Image: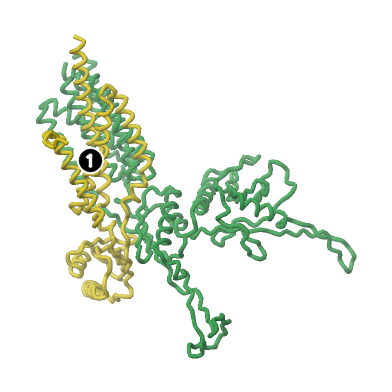
Chain colours: A yellow, B green
């Protein structure tokens, strides 16, 4: 194998770099998994009710004091201002933390809340694959029809080359995106699929532009030959 | 330029202005002493609305207590008697969920049954997470008029049984079902009977055939001892079709039924038909149909292996500040207009107005076609706006070859159109939203540019 020749080609170098990132992503995924957003990851929830109206800002401050450097989310229950559902980036909440939390709430809202009145639930994480499974058939159908369209429209281009382009366009950007998410520990959540869809569209736009260029080249060559 | 063309141009510009004002400001009318916008509101997905959280925790309550003597025999517990360990008695607590059932395999099975039921109930958006350590399952579904019904079906065990009415002996269960389908029988008076057709498998059919000889209606001749008169008494031996201990049909096998008359228990074809209601009103038929579909979902999925304690409540949206997204959208649009004006000067200014008209028209179409806007849908909206900008720029550059530009652009956009149409049929609202918005975006883009942009650009050129 002539490595010098392979690495002289710019495209090969970029491909090699992408492959390195993808392999690194797979390794990180296998060893430490993906980092999920708070509502998607292993977390704990507190369901709490008091007689006073709760304020989101105050609640966030209390959570910051009791669980420093821990992400949390406050959502109100049943359109009421005195019942909340709190999600905390912690797999287990200790009794000390519960006591501190209850004390802070009682101090701020002059209430008589007890630890027993708190409902604490330990949540599991959402699996990305379960989410993707909800539209896997549509993805497969769309890809099959798009590939067929490209093969028909760009039939003048060498089939092997065209398939190479299509495989690269279909796999590399998405794998690269998920590898970057995994390596950089970017949380996977509600924004992940919209971003992936965006990448998918951009890839196909770029691919169409490249294939149009190739098609024009072939046509101009043919025209020259005719002349 | 001819006077007619000038007038047409002015009319088109006015039309664009009206569309922009209608879409971004609205059309107001006095309704019930209030000024109301008559343009329909935007429909948004679960992330932007209140949703329902269902927490299913393993039921750890003690169902009963059994007492065993020193020889291991179960003792019949008497009131007021203490069964102490020092006397050789062992007390065992029987929990609702036996200890041996509490394993990851069953937790996963419960989760997969819930996922199947959500799919079968056509729930457009859901998040399900499972704690593999304690088996707690958390579900999040959109809040609407179907939510309560969905929760009932999701949390039910789904146990199907055909029992003897008198002895309660189980004769058939879910393992004997081959297929369940919803059926409609139109009666001679035009009313419709909504029913569920449960077809049994080979084993079920053979048991069913045997049952047909036992569970029938018989007549007995009873002689009155005092008067000596003979009377005929009809005695029926019934079977009960139960789902989670609720009776859905109590009937016997009818013999000599004329053709064309529905048999609820048909031994010949091995079919049980559960009627849900008879009506000629569409609303009622739909109601019965939904009830039948709910039961179909329970019968199509396995029984929940564990019993859960359920808590459910409505929670506020995950993204509660939609305004930020709107501001970002406006900022992107302004940036796009600035680029257009800098690049194409006076033509760019007109193009920016035309672009704004496109966005306004697309938003109006989305409101009238009841398309749900999700984050993925917003991606579709942004993509269509950028594509329209690119197409208009191309049209400005090649005014003399506008038709070729439009034709080539359509060919280039076919992959995206395929994606939009396919995704429109997705059951997941987020993906369907992207599909529908992109579909309408591209459809409006083509019509708008062929009719309006092309005319304006040609008029400017002249």
The residue lying toward the viewer, choosing from A192 and B322, is A192
Dot 1 falls on a residue whose secondary structure is helix
Q: Quadrant of the N terminus of chain A?
A: top left
Left or right relative to B54: residue B408? left
Q: Position of residue B145 (x, y in %)?
A: 42, 52
- Outermost residue, bottom side: B86
Q: Chain of mark 1?
A: A
Q: Position of residue A191 (x, y in %)?
A: 25, 48
User: Which residue appears at 44% of the width and 57% of the height?
Assistant: B154
Does residue B82 lie above or below B326 as drawn?
A: below
Q: Position of residue B146 (x, y in %)?
A: 43, 52
User: Which residue appears at 47% of the width and 73% of the height?
Assistant: B95
In the rendered image, which residue does mark 1 sit on? A173
The residue lying toward the viewer, choosing from A54 and B105, is B105
Q: Is residue B21 visible?
A: no
User: Which residue appears at 51% of the width and 90% of the height?
Assistant: B87
């Amino acid at each position: 194998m002539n490595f010098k020749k392979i690495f002289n080609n710019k495209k090969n170098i970029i491909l090699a770099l992408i492959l390195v990132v993808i392999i690194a992503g797979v390794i990180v995924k296998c060893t430490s998994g993906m980092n999920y957003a708070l509502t998607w990851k292993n977390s704990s929830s507190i369901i709490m009710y008091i007689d006073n109206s709760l304020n989101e800002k105050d609640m966030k401050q209390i959570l910051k004091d009791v669980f420093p450097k821990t992400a949390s989310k406050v959502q109100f229950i049943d359109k009421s201002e005195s019942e909340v559902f709190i999600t905390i980036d912690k797999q287990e909440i200790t009794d000390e933390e519960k006591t501190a939390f209850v004390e802070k709430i009682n101090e701020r809202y002059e209430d008589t809340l007890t630890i027993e009145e708190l409902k604490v639930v330990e949540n599991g994480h959402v699996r990305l694959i379960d989410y993707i499974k909800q539209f896997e058939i549509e993805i497969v159908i769309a890809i099959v029809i798009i590939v067929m369209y490209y093969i028909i429209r760009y039939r003048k281009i060498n089939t092997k080359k065209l398939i190479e382009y299509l495989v690269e366009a279909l796999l590399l950007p998405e794998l690269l995106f998920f590898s970057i998410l995994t390596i950089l520990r970017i949380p996977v959540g509600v924004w992940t699929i919209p971003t992936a869809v965006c990448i998918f569209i951009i890839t196909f736009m770029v691919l169409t532009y490249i294939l149009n260029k190739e098609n024009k080249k072939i046509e101009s060559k043919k025209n020259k030959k005719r002349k | 330029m001819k006077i007619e063309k000038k007038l047409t141009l002015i009319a088109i510009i006015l039309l664009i202005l009206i569309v922009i004002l209608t879409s971004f400001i609205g059309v107001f009318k006095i309704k019930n002493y209030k000024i109301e916008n008559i343009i329909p509101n935007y429909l948004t997905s679960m992330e932007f609305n209140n949703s329902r959280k269902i927490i299913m925790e393993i039921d750890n309550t003690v169902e009963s207590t059994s007492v065993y003597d020193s020889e291991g025999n179960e003792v019949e517990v008497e009131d007021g008697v203490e069964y102490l360990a020092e006397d050789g008695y062992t007390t065992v607590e029987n929990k609702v969920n036996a200890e041996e059932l509490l394993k990851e395999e069953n937790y996963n099975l419960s989760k997969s049954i819930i996922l199947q039921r959500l799919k079968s109930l056509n729930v457009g958006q859901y998040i399900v997470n499972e704690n593999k350590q304690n088996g707690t399952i958390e579900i999040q579904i959109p809040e609407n008029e179907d939510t309560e019904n969905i929760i009932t079906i999701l949390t039910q065990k789904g146990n199907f049984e055909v029992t003897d009415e008198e002895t309660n002996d189980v004769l058939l269960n879910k393992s004997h079902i081959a297929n369940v389908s919803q059926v409609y029988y139109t009666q001679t008076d035009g009313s419709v009977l909504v029913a569920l057709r449960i077809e049994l498998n080979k084993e079920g059919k053979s048991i069913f055939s045997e049952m047909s000889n036992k569970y029938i209606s018989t007549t007995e001749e009873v002689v009155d001892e005092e008067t000596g008169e003979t009377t005929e008494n009809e005695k029926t031996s019934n079977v009960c079709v139960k789902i989670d201990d609720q009776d859905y049909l109590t009937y016997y096998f009818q013999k000599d039924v004329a053709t064309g008359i529905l048999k609820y228990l048909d031994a010949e074809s091995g079919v049980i038909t559960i009627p849900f209601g008879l009506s000629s009103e569409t609303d009622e038929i739909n109601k019965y149909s939904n009830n039948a579909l709910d039961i179909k979902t329970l019968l199509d999925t396995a029984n929940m292996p564990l019993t859960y304690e359920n808590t459910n409540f409505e929670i506020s949206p995950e993204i509660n500040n939609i305004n930020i997204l709107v501001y970002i959208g406006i900022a992107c649009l302004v940036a796009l207009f600035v680029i257009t004006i800098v690049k194409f000067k006076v033509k760019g200014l007109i193009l920016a107005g035309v672009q704004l008209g496109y966005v306004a028209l697309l938003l109006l179409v989305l409101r009238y076609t009841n398309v749900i806007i999700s984050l993925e849908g917003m991606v579709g909206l942004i993509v269509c706006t950028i594509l329209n900008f690119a197409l208009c720029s191309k049209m400005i550059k090649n005014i003399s070859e506008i038709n070729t530009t439009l034709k080539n652009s359509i060919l280039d956009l076919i992959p995206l159109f395929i994606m939009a149409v396919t995704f429109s049929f997705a059951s997941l609202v987020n993906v369907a939203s992207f599909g529908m918005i992109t579909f309408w975006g591209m459809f409006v883009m083509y019509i708008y540019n062929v009719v309006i942009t092309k005319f304006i650009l040609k008029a400017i050129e002249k």
